[in-house]
Image (tube, helix red, strand yellow):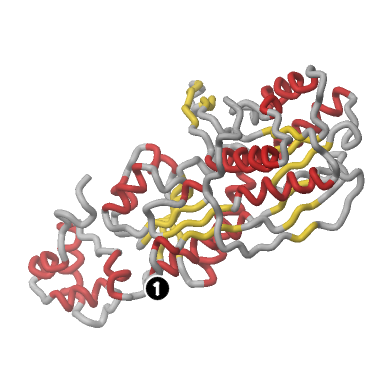
């Protein structure tokens, strides 16, 4: 790909075609309509159209001029019709929009296909001054945008940290530690982990024309980080049972049941299950109720997100964190970069806010346990030699 700005029309060419000075063109394009006559303005507009001229959005960053339009693009489809994901995605985008509104910035969202089809020029056409990318910093798409000179902040997962201008993501290790410490404090020593999609798999997608598409789905670094932290926690206490770590795709409803049936066919059964999110935890609750397994007497269950409905009994214990804060921190990282902060120091980690202990672990609802929000550093990757084979 050619570098952003290479072979683009210049303001000098616009001025030459319109037969006026560069200064007049510059002031006119910045919104000063009193700098020239109506006839001159028509010549400028005609020259801009003929040359397909786009102002350089990076100029504002380079010379300190305020820029007010940011792009938002995700490496996953924010509108793919999955109600579970929509809850999370809407909240994280809301955090960005809230921060943007407070600072008088506009946010331009790009369709998912811009990423899927690698349409770099759609981002580099001059409409936005920087990009907030929901996904990994190691994507080739991100590298192309950065190489072209566009400021990029990645957010949403541990792999958002990378060769970009800043990042924001959750402290996944602390989430697992908080959940497991709660179970440990209740006396559980036989703890299983129902993981998220920490291994590559295939997702079925139904196209509008009725065609069934098999789409490869990469492992989630969020799920991997929570899994590694859980394995480390249990291993350090001599309580890791590799047979009680779910397979990579057990987050899918059918495989949750299959995994639980295998665990309960063994002589030694788990007394507690830490689930990667509340939706997985609810599947475990439904399975246990169908089997006549009493919660939490026979098995305690805890999830992550604290978004499940209180109409389901028992009510889930869960680790809560501010999804909106990830979006806000991503926006703040962009402002800090604009102020000159070294990108190497512009990576933000958001800790969980509290553990809410309810009847799925303690048998009754209790006040939430507050968790320290301020965390200076985080180890991105935890020793993986304690992990079982996939």
Residue 389, position in %: x, y? 58, 25
Q: Relative to 3, is 106 above or below? A: below
- From the viewer's perspective, is 231 left or right of 25? right
Front residue (pair 357, 173) = 173
Element class at badge 1:
loop
At 68% from the left and 27% from the top, the residue drawn is 253
Asked if 33 appears above or below 196 in the picture, the reply is below
- Image quarter where the C terminus lies is top right
- Front residue of 311/250: it is 250
Q: Where is residue 103 in the image (x, y as percent from the top left)?
A: 50, 72
Mark 1 sits on what residue? Answer: 339
Residue 340 horizontal side relative to residue 251, left or right: left
Residue 364, above or below 201: below
Residue 1: image location, x then y, percent: 22, 44
Q: Which residue is drawn at 37% across and 71% down?
A: 340
Q: Residue at x 17, y 78 (%)?
A: 23
Q: Which residue is drawn at 22% across and 82% down?
A: 35
- Expressed as whole percent of the image width and height from the top left, the position of residue 289 reads 86, 28
Is residue 30 shown left or right of residue 350? left
184 and 328: which one is in front? 184
């Amino acid at each position: 790909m050619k570098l952003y700005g290479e072979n683009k029309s210049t303001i000098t060419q616009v001025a030459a075609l319109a037969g006026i000075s560069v200064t007049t063109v510059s002031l006119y394009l910045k919104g000063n309509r009193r700098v020239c006559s109506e006839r001159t303005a028509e010549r400028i507009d005609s020259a801009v159209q003929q040359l397909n001229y786009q102002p350089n959005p990076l100029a504002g960053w380079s010379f300190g001029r305020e820029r007010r339009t940011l792009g938002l693009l995700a490496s996953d489809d924010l509108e793919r019709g999955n109600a579970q994901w929509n809850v999370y995605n809407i909240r994280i985008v809301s955090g960005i929009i809230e921060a943007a509104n407070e600072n008088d910035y506009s946010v331009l969202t790009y369709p998912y296909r811009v990423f899927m089809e690698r349409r770099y020029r759609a981002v580099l056409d001059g409409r936005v001054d920087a990009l907030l990318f929901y996904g990994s910093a190691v994507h080739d798409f991100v590298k192309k945008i950065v190489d072209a000179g566009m400021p990029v902040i990645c957010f949403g997962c541990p792999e958002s940290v990378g060769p970009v201008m800043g990042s924001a993501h959750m402290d996944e290790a602390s989430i697992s530690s908080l959940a497991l410490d709660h179970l440990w404090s209740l006396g559980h020593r036989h703890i299983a982990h129902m993981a998220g999609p920490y291994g590559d798999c295939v997702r079925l997608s139904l196209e509008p024309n009725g065609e069934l598409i098999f789409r490869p789905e990469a492992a989630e670094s969020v799920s991997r980080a929570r899994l590694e932290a859980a394995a480390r926690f249990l291993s350090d206490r001599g309580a890791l049972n590799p047979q009680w770590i779910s397979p990579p795709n057990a987050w899918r409803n059918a495989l949750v049941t299959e995994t639980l049936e295998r665990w309960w066919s063994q002589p030694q059964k788990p007394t507690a299950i830490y689930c990667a999110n509340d939706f997985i935890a609810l599947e475990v609750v439904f399975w246990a109720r169908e089997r006549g397994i009493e919660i939490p007497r026979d098995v305690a269950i805890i999830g992550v997100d604290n978004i499940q409905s209180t109409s389901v009994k028992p009510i889930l214990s869960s680790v809560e964190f501010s999804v909106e804060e990830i979006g806000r921190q991503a926006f703040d990282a962009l402002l800090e970069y604009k102020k000159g902060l070294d990108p190497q120091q512009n990576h933000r980690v958001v800790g969980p806010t509290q553990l809410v202990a309810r009847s799925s672990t303690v048998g009754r609802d209790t006040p939430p346990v507050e968790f320290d929000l301020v965390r200076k550093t985080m180890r991105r990757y935890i020793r993986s030699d304690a992990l079982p084979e996939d």
